[in-house]
Structures are given as C-alpha cells and as structure tokens.
Image (spheres, coloured by chain):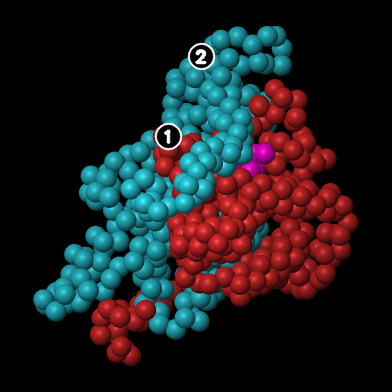
Chain colours: A red, B cyan
Amino acid sequence: MSDGRPRAGRRRRDPVRLALAVHLAGIWLFMLAPIGFVLVYAFSSVSYAVFPPPGLSLRWFVKLFQQAALFQAAVNSLLVALAATAGSLMAGTLAALALVRYRFWGREILRAVFLAPLIVPRIAFGVAMLIYAIVLRRFGGLDSLILAHLMVTLPFAISVLSAALVGVDRTLEEAAMDLGATPLVTFWKVTLPQIRTGLAVSAFFAFIISWDQVETSLFLVKTDNMTLPVAMFYYLQRQQDPVVAALSVFLIGLAAAGAVVAVVLVNPRDLQRLLAAGGR
Amino acid sequence: MTTATVPLRARPARAARRRARRLAFLPLLAPATGAFVLVFWVCMGVLVVMSVYPFLAAGTPRLTAEAWRRFLGDAYYWSVVGTTLRLAAVVTGACLLLGYPAAYAIHTIRRPGWALACYVVLFAPILVSVVVRTYGWLLLLSPTGAVNWVLRTLGLVREPIPLIFNTTGIVIAMVHILLPFAVFPILSVIGQLGGELKEAAMDLGATRWQTFRRVTLPLTLPGVVAAAQIVFTLTISAFVTPFLMGGGKVQILSGLIYRDMEAVNLAFASVVALVLLGLAVAILVASNLLVRGTYRRAEVTV
C-alpha cells in the first residue's frame, strides 16, 4: 500500500495532508450529522425540530408502538426484500455464469438488456409497473411488488457477481472435473465458495435496495398493504413528529449491526472492488 | 475454448462433455432473461403505449398525442426540465468537489483501521433509509434547527436563514445521499494508480500541484466521469428527498410524475416518465462519447 507515495507525505506538518485530514473530518461530520440528529430527536419532548430540544421524553416510542400499520408495513418490507434478494441471487448467479463463461452471439446485447434497469429512473419504472399491474389485474399484491423490486436488484446482483466470477480460479474447477466431480458438484464445492464475497455483497445490496425502495413501490402499494419506507414517507408528508425518529432508532440499530457484520465478514479489498462494480 | 487448446490425447468423454457444455448457457440465462423481458421490457413498452393510447376511466382507449402535445407545448414543463437539470448539475458539481479530495484523502491513509472507518462512515448511511436521512436534514436545517442555532449563536446571522422547503435544502440533502456514489468510483480509480508516474514527475522537477494537475487528475478522470454520471442520473430521477426537502416549492420532473399519478392522469405521467428516461439516456450517451473521445479503452471498473 505504501509504495509510490510521495516521500513528502511523511512529514508531520505537511499542509496538503493537513488540509485533506480536515476535509475528511468535515465529511465525517456531514455524513453522520443527520443520522445523529434523528437519534437525538427520537427522545425529544416536543414534536417539532427545535434545537436544543427543551426536554427528554419517551412518548414518541409510546406513540410508535400504537401504530400497528407501521409494524405490518415492516413485515411486508421484510418479506419483499427477502424474496427479491433470493430471486436476484439465484437468477443473478446463473446469468453472470453465462455472461462470464460463455462466448455467444448477442452476449453484449443481452448484458445491456440486463443492466438497462439501472439507468431507467425508478419512479418512471414505478409508473410503468403500476399500469402493467392494473392491466394484469395484480395491483396491490406483494407479488407485483416483489417482481418490481427484482427488476431493480437483479442488475446489481448480475454486475457484482460477474465481477466476482471473473476472479474465480478456473484450474481448480478443471481439477475437480478431472477428478470426476459432476459440473453441479464442481459448481457447489469449488465455484460457489470462491464467489462468497460476491454473493454476500449482492445479497446485501439487493436487500438494502429493496428494503429502502420508495420510488418503485410508491404507486404499487395500497393503503392496507404498505412497505415501511413508503409508510414513513406518507407519515412525514402528513406530520413531521418524531414518531419517524423513534422508528429510526430501531432501523439505525439494525443498520449498524449489519455494518458490523459486513466489516467482520468481508475482506475490505474485495469489498472495495465489488462496491465499485455495484456502485450503480 | 477453441479445439486447438484441447490436448491431442484428451479422452473422448471429456471432449463430449465440452460439446454438451457449449450450449449450457441457455438454461443459465433463462430465469433472468425471462424476468427482464416479461416484466421490465414489457413495462417500458407499456409506458410508450400509455403515453399515446391511454385508457381513461371513462370510455375506450384511443390513439392520441394529446399528453405529448400538452407537455411539449407548455413553457412551464420546459422550465421544470430546466430546474431538474440545473439541480442535478449543482448536486453533481458539489459531490465531485467534496468527493474527490475525500477519496484522495482516504487513499493516502496508511493505517488500515482508519481507512476502514472512513469506508464505514461513507457507506453506513446508505443502510439508513433515504426517508430517515431526509428527515434528519429537515430537523437539522429547519429555522429552529441546529444549523440555524449555530449560525445565530456565532452571531453570523440575526434571523434564521431558510434552509428547507427550497433548493438549498434539496441540494444539501441530495449531496449527502449521493456522496458515497461519487467517492467509490473515484477511489477505485485512484487505487489502481501506480505511484511510478507520480514519482517520475516529481523527480523531473514538477511541483506537487503540477504533478496532480498533469498526472494524477487526468489518470483519474475516468473515475470522475463515472461518478458524475452516477450522481447526475440518480439526481434527476430522485423523488423522496426533493419532494420532502422542497416542501412543494421546487417542482422537478419526478414531482410532476407523482402529482399526475395522484390525479390518476396516467397518460401524462407516462409522458413525463419517458422524458425523464430520455434525459437519463441522453446524458449517459453524451458523456460516454465524450469519454471515449478522450480515453480510448480507459480502464474503468464501473
């Protein structure tokens, strides 16, 4: 890591390094401040954003637990996100295998067909999906929601898993096959373990994207069949009391746990490479 | 995979297996292709059809360019297109100005622990819902919020300055949400940069600024362009943050779509959705052409 750095960087009082450090500190503050303030206001005694909060109270948590609809929305979101994740891992691994391993006519066209949903604005796709769901008489069901989310998560899975498959050592597969393993056994015991990080990153991406999908879901949900971010969006549109902040305490806790798991399980080098591949 | 690579003494069974595997990609592709064609691509067709052949609540559908005529013929909608593009340009510029030095700074960190902490700080907010992050900015930037409190306490302003329900608030919150998407592509390109060219430039007497401007920046430009593309397209299509931070005062295309969907005006919403899609595609194509002109086969991982 350290080779090729300018030797000037070693000096303690290097103004450029100091400026960069200050900039980075500012970025930390900027990135963390809104999340920190949501946590603070969850315990505020008043319903509006006044700083500093005049007092502390747990009443927003009490009010939160009276909202059964938000709980149902969280369950819906979880179901949809798990289904979209499972679907994009399975279809994504197979498609990535075909795209990386085989040379066939139309491969680049197909890749474009697969990745196109990434550049289509999600709210535009949401409109189209609503009309389609109405035509098919599937409006308001979780099935159309899962399919819609799959269209958003699958391209990420395909690009991340393709990047992961490029790094697979083919000689190990050849060796397994020569020793008599069937293609399926080879895939299961040799290929899959090598794309572990890719699978984890795509699952993570797919779950997070689906779990936090507002634009695609917005028109597809009914009032009695919400997902959590859409329910929160409607709540904030009507009133801005800290019930959303109280709920966020739990969501941020979950996210922090997820981040810790990711940091512990995933090799940072791999993570950086795959994040760049899935960055869009 | 050509026959030339098969050794002469290859067992016949192995050759047969290879032949069978040559077409194995077809079942592999089936699930993803089926899903994309039957859902996504049909949806895109549905959008086009609906924009010219609307089925309205009353009566049978009929072919009409009414919605298109209404959009294209009204200066208001063109001004909304202008606002959308301007907003995206400002957010993209801010993300690059903040993101490039941040990526560079992370790259120069030598302790792995600190580098990892930077990744987490940049990446973790993505795990928190966009709605929650927007709400955080509403709290921070409100007239009685913390930012105005600090400004007033320091004596910088007398009256609270309006930071929400206007473009300023939208830009701040959008930059927060999209900054990670700007930093990661730049970081990945800086990471691929060997130190030799920089060393050479410095050894030949270039100052650090000259080295940066003539060596580092041009070499990392593909990452900057990728970052700009991502941030720009994500900004023009964003809805939640501009809608909540704008408080209905700033109208952009996604808000127009939402309004027309609320009014069950599917034909017009389809037109606006297609215009948005057209803008996204045009911007990507234009910037790709621009990049291809400058860097033939540049190594960009994004």
Disc marking residue B192: none
Q: Residue B265, image x and y in percent?
A: 63, 24
Along the viewing direction, whichever of A71 and B226 lies nearer the viewer: B226
Left or right of B253 on screen, residue B4: left
Q: What amino acid type should be assigned to the residue bearing mark 1?
A: Gly
- B66 vs B142: above or below: above
- A19 vs A179: above or below: below
Q: Residue A127, image x and y in percent?
A: 61, 32
Instruction: Kindly state the secondary structure of the residue where label 2 is placed.
Output: loop
Q: Residue at x 27, y 50 (%)?
A: B297
Along the viewing direction, whichever of B26 and A93 lies nearer the viewer: B26
Disc marking residue A106: 1
Instruction: Kindly state the secondary structure of the residue where label 1 is placed.
Output: loop
In three-dimensional space, the C-alpha distance between marks 2 and 1, rounded to whole angstroms, equals 35 Å
Q: Residue at x 54, y 11 (%)?
A: B64
Q: What amino acid type should be assigned to the residue bearing mark 2?
A: Ala
Residue numbers of the magenta segment = A147-154
Q: Which residue is mark 2?
A: B65
User: Is residue A190 visible in the rendered structure shown here?
Assistant: yes
Queried whether the magenta region covers residue A163, the answer comes back as no
Q: Residue at x 36, y 45 (%)?
A: B2
| Same chain shared by disc 2 and disc 1 | no
Queried whether the magenta region covers residue A148, the answer comes back as yes
